[in-house]
Image (spheres, rainbow, N blue to C red):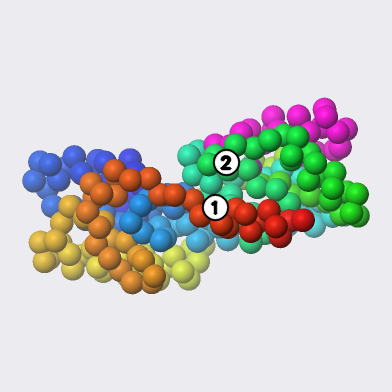
């Protein structure tokens, strides 16, 4: 169970004749061959819950808050949680950000009467502290930064993750018993599938940029 690193270790064992079946369990949800990884939905709900609570303070104090979330190479958490949480701006590693455009959107919201702004930043897109300081120096606005860190990884698993883990675990055992090994259990369109481990590791999962564009539209 794990992500890219764990599966590379599993594949190395497979080359020595050890029968292995991988179960995707990474909050980054960046593995090819599966729509969801165990832990991803729980992490998203943790982030959205934090955004909701931060928004209450942001509104009452009329400030801009930057929320830094996990994601060194993948913006999956930042994009989906930012979209679901109604963030005004979302910064992800897959799309280089322009500080001028970020400030323009911030000022546009203020001019339209918005009392606050939430900017969600994936750690791989830049440092929340540094971005906040750039905005403060350029605009004079009060900026507050919250780095969620490992809070995203803990807490009570959601129903979605519990069911996914149960289904994948059972299927992995069945595959081992049938001799169907050196593969990963994935889920596509709610159906469980078996994907070759080498195929999973050779490809990089692409971000859904249509959702990124949607987030930009809804934040206007």
Q: Is residue 34 magenta?
A: no
Residue at the location (83% across, 29% down)?
A: 138
- Whether label 1 touches label 2, CB < 8 Å: yes
- N-terminal of the pair, mark 1 or mark 2, is 2
Residue 128's spot in the image, x, y percent?
67, 36
Nearest the camera: 117 or 156?
Answer: 117
Label 1, label 2: how many angstroms apart (C-alpha)? 9 Å
> In which quarter of the view is residue 60 placed?
bottom right
Q: Please provide the residue range marked out in magenta.
A: 121-144
> In which quarter of the view is residue 21 placed?
bottom left
Describe the element under mark 2 as helix, strand or loop: loop
Describe the element under mark 1 as helix, strand or loop: helix
With 26 as the anchor, is 72 left or right in this view? right
Residue at the location (88% across, 32% down)?
A: 140
Residue at the location (17% across, 52% down)?
A: 182
**On screen, residue 189 above or below 76:** below
> Which is the main secondary structure of the residues drawn in magenta?
helix
Q: Which residue is mark 1?
A: 209
Residue 64's spot in the image, x, y percent?
80, 45
Q: Which residue is mark 2?
A: 95
**On screen, residue 157 above or below 116:** below
Q: How many marks?
A: 2
Nearest the camera: 16 or 80?
Answer: 80
């Amino acid at each position: 169970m794990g992500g890219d690193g764990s599966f590379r270790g599993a594949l190395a064992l497979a080359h020595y004749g050890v029968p292995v079946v991988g179960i995707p369990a990474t909050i980054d949800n960046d593995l090819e061959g599966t729509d969801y990884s165990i832990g991803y939905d729980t992490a998203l709900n943790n982030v959205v819950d934090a955004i909701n609570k931060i928004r209450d303070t942001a509104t009452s104090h009329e400030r801009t808050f930057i929320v830094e979330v996990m994601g060194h190479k993948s913006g999956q958490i930042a994009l989906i949680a930012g979209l679901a949480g109604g963030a005004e701006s979302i910064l992800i590693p897959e799309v280089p950000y322009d500080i001028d455009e970020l400030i323009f959107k911030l000022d546009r919201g203020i001019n339209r009467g918005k009392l606050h702004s939430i900017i969600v930043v994936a750690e791989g897109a830049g440092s929340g502290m540094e971005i906040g300081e750039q905005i403060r120096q350029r605009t004079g606005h009060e900026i507050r930064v919250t780095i969620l860190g490992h809070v995203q990884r803990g807490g009570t698993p959601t129903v979605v993750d519990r069911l996914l883990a149960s289904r994948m675990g059972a299927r992995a055992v069945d595959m081992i018993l049938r001799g169907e090994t050196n593969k990963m259990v994935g889920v596509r369109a709610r159906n469980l599938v078996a994907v070759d481990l080498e195929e999973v590791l050779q490809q990089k999962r692409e971000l859904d940029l249509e959702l990124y564009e949607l987030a930009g539209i809804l934040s206007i």
